[in-house]
Amino acid sequence: MRYASGEEFLAAPRKAVTVFGMSGLGKTWLADRLRADSWFHYSADYRIGTRYMGEHIVDNFKREAMKVPLLRELLLSDSIYISSNLRFANLSPLSTYLGKPGAPAKGGIPFKEYVHRQQQHRAAEISAMLDVPQFIDKAHDIYGYAHFMCDASGSLCEVVDPQDADDPVLRTLTDHTLLVYLRGSNAHTRTLIERFDAAPKPMYYAPDFLAKSWDTFKRENGDLADDAVDPDAFIRWGYAQLLAYRQPVYEAIADHHGVTVDAAALAAAPDTTAILTLIASAIDAAGANAT
């Protein structure tokens, strides 16, 4: 572990943590709190969507624009340019690019193209995680931040193997940061499912899980053809399966490489001091369990 004890963590003049868990449990909220107390916030999703997926996103915008005669003419004459306005608080350009597989008439994209974009996201997420050490240095050397928080994507668990001591992403993160898992309750899970059902959004899936889920959904709904699948119905159905699939992987990452903090306890922490005390207690608990 990055810190041998909670006391060592609290006393460290330069702290670095990577916070992970399911989207919607408070990672970005925590980042906002810490940033207000002079912590550098490294958003994995922002890095994915700008540095590694930005060109793919904009190219897709251009493909759509080229279907409109006026925009086509203006693009070909360099009279307009198209860019993505992806921000920490608005990742819509990235999720829109990932898309949803299924019937084109309902906003779906071909499954083969969907898988291709998923593969692009996987490579981008791995690269974004491997960039963490250089951003720790940048945060300190350029901007003067002593403390650093990596706000990991909810799909971190899909691109690592917690059983592999030499997993390149986990080794990079544990060498340079403390991995902190935000663990939700059953009530959190129900809330996330309800929220997702009301506004389904594109997600990243591990390749094997995606292939199995796609085949199962089509079979259970009358052996549907790929282009007959309702995109929103599929991702709504798949979300609960995804939560169940990810949970033990999150737990394994925390058990083998980091610490666990209760999401509800964190949300109730009144200030940064209380937040850091919770993390310090989790370090001591992990150490006690290891012995």
Image: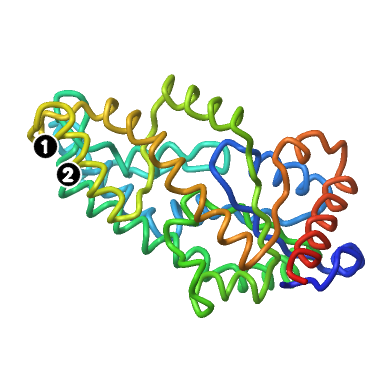
| Image x and y of residue 162, in percent | 51, 66
Which residue is drawn at the image coordinates 13% and 31% (left, top)?
69
The quarter of the picture where the N terminus appears is bottom right
In this view of the protein, which residue sits in the foreground, 278 or 153? 278
SS at circle 2 = helix
Q: Position of residue 101 (x, y in %)?
A: 22, 38
Q: Quadrant of residue 24?
A: top right
For the residue labelled by badge 1, is the local secondary structure a helix, a strand or a loop? helix
Seen in the picture, residue 141 relative to 57 is either above or below; the reply is below
**Residue under pointer 2:** 111
Picture quadrant of residue 252: bottom right
Determine which of the numbered discs, if any, sits on residue 172 in the image. Answer: none
Residue 231 drawn at (x, y percent): 24, 30
Dot 2 crowding, Cα within 10 Å, few <14, some 14–19, many 20+: some
Marks 2 and 1: in contact by CB < 8 Å?
Answer: yes
Residue drawn at point x = 75 percent, y = 69 percent:
140
Mark count: 2
Query: Reading the chain from its start, which is encountered first: label 1 or label 2?
Result: 2
Question: Of the numbered discs in the image, which one, if any, rests on residue 226?
Answer: 1
Residue 138 placement (x, y as % from top left): 67, 69
22 to 186, vertically: above or below: below
The quadrant the C terminus occupies is bottom right
Please, what is the three-letter code of the amino acid marked with disc 1?
Answer: Asp
Relative to 201, say whether 51 is above or below. below
Is 156 positioned to the left or the right of 71 in the image? right
Name which residue lies at 91% across and 65% down: 7
Residue drawn 57% across the image and 37% down it: 89
Q: How far apart are labels 1 and 2 at the CA level? A: 7 Å
